Amino acid sequence: MELRGVRHVYSQGLDLRVGKLRVRRFSLNRHLPEKGWVETHAHRHGQFLLYLSGSGRQRVGRRVREVVAGSVFYFSPGCEHSFIEGEGRRPLCLALDVDLAGMDRAVEAVLSATEVREVRQAVSQLHGWQAGEVEVSPREGGAVLVILDVLMRATGMVKEARRAVVPAVVRRAREAFQQVDGVGCAAVGEVAERIGYHRDHLARLLKRATGMTPGQLRDAERLKRVKRELRRGGAISAVADGCGFADPNYFSRWFKRQTGVSPMVWREREAG
């Protein structure tokens, strides 16, 4: 739906699906100087709206709310809303069109300075869309999910965020930890970059969802592979090398830290 009074800095149609959650479109919009308001309208889908700069008043149904930089709103399908611009800096707002099962009410919040920085950092990874690129890369898709996670947490949709977004992050991280030219296990920073997350934010998501740090999750995924290879037989040194351990002695020490026994003892117990 095109609205008078705003201009797309860039807008990208999406079809990101995580369980019952679907992200339809990402838009970054600048309010136009010749018109200081956005008319009353509603959507058939849900929408998150985050004001990155500017001020004004947002009408949601019959309520009117003050808007400052960091104000975020979720409008359920059919929820009427409009905006009147305040004085000062021209508003810049981010819109995420979503289908979110079970959310049939409007929600509002104000992001912290840390959360605003987190969103801006994710938005900076979408610069290709402004240049006219239409293909959505895994990195860009991950950046959109970072933004969505921040907005859902800030608006109190904790249950929905954990159910829909975080499990997908865990799955993608697990997969990425196993995808390094078929050998070994990826470094934490490499995995964060590959799936489009800032390393610190990825650490918080994984800790909240699994109780493990990225390093612990990486070791857990590596241990799964090591155990599979040990069950197949072959020299311990060959298993170590095939799983990315250049030093067999370090491999034995690492394995004992994970399991409490050496690789040889573990395999003998499995065979028994």
Image (cartoon, grey):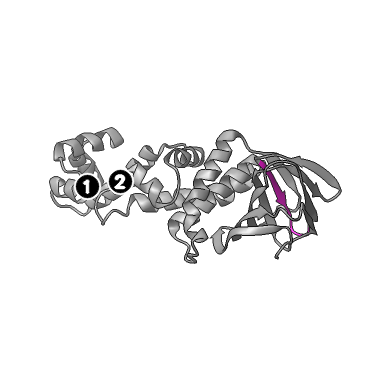
Q: Which mark is residue 222?
A: 2
Q: Position of residue 3 (x, y in %)?
A: 72, 62
Q: Position of residue 77 (x, y in %)?
A: 74, 59
Please tell me which residue is depicted at 51% across the width and 38% down the height of the picture.
Answer: 208
| Magenta stretch encompasses residue 172 | no
Magenta stretch: helix, strand or loop mostly: strand
Kindly identify the amino acid type of the residue bearing the numbered disc 2.
Answer: Arg
In this rendered view, identify the residue nearer to me: 42 or 207. Answer: 42
Left or right: 72, with 123 as reference point: right
Task: Report the span colored magenta.
Answer: 71-78
- Observer able to see residue 261: no
Residue for badge 1: 244
Q: Position of residue 32 (x, y in %)?
A: 70, 55
Quadrant in the picture for the N terminus:
bottom right
- Observer able to see residue 143: yes
In this rendered view, identify the residue nearer to me: 206 or 118. Answer: 118
